[in-house]
Image (tube, rainbow, N blue to C red):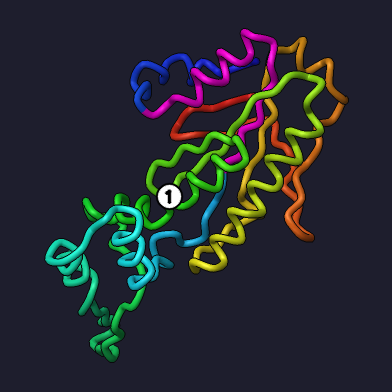
Amino acid sequence: MTFTVTLFLSITALRPRCRRCTSLLLAADEGQMSALCLLDLTAAFDTVDHELLLLQLERQSGLRGTVLQWFRSYLSGRSIRVLYGGSMSSIVYILCSVPQESVLGPRLFILYSADLKDIAKDHCVTIHSFADDTQLYLHWSCNDMTTTIARLQQCIVDINNWMSVNRVKLNIDKTELLWAGTRRSLSMGDDSFPYLQLGAAIIAPSQHVRVLGVIFFS
């Protein structure tokens, strides 16, 4: 696997967030290939449904009673209006979204999307999330590529279905895919690695992707 200098300079500083770096490197050392898929969500924080979030906090995290009411109070009663050119707009009450720049916002989004870990686990795919930054990755031997691609593709299909039900939109056009490995293992595959398909949409493999400031090249 080829990396830019940026990766090696950043690994120490990003070690708590860079499990994917270590995992991809170890897999390459063992002669395995890897697939890394970076999911892009459209306005993720703005689409969080308050009632669905409260249901997730109760069902997944076991919050009930007074504690759950704290979160309900935090989310409810929010409104927005715009002042422009001396004119004030009417008040719009916010029924969805979590404050992106707040301390709680990113954590609430992770709790809101906690079901994604179960979906990935069902397909034996590793998932890592940092706020709304979500990556899927898995490793395989050269002769297992067909089944691995099918497994990853079905995982993304199921994640997309969950997102549709829970009012989160997966942006296929900005979702990225990278096939990674050593030069030798990559040369044992076809000249062009396959794409993933989600309905009529296609996720084509990229030559490089950026993950939290770390650049990966295939």
Residue at image position (21%, 70%) is: 72
Residue type at the position of mark 1: Asp
Q: Is residue 124 above or below residue 90?
A: above
Residue closer to the observer: 160 or 89: 160
Q: Residue furthest right?
A: 190
Q: Is residue 218 visible?
A: no
Query: Any magenta on residue 30?
Result: yes
Quadrant that contains the N terminus: top right
Tell me if residue 30 can be seen: yes
Q: Could you tell whether 206 is left or right of 69 in the image?
A: right
Residue 7 appears at what percent x and percent y?
49, 19
When the figure is inspected, residue 94 is found, relative to residue 54, above or below; the finding is below
Mark 1 residue element: loop
Residue 88 in picture, x, y percent from top left: 25, 88
The quadrant of the rendering that contains the C terminus is top right
Is residue 121 shown left or right of residue 35?
left
Crowdedness near tag 1: few (<14), some (14–19) or many (≥20) residues, C-alpha within 10 Å: some
Q: How many marks?
A: 1
Magenta stretch holds residue 129: no
Relative to 9, does residue 128 appear above or below in the rendering? below
Span shown in magenta: 17-38
**Residue beneath the point at 53% across and 39% down:** 135
Q: Quadrant of residue 37?
A: top right
Q: In which quadrant of the rendered view does residue 170 lie?
A: bottom right
Query: Which residue is farthest left?
Result: 66
Q: Residue 161 location, x and y as percent?
A: 61, 61
Question: Could you tell me which residue is drawn at 56 percent across and 15 percent down?
Answer: 25
Q: Nearer the viewer, residue 74 or 192?
A: 74
Q: Residue at x 45, y 31 (%)?
A: 213
Residue under pointer 1: 132
- Residue 145 in percent (x, y) is at 78, 28
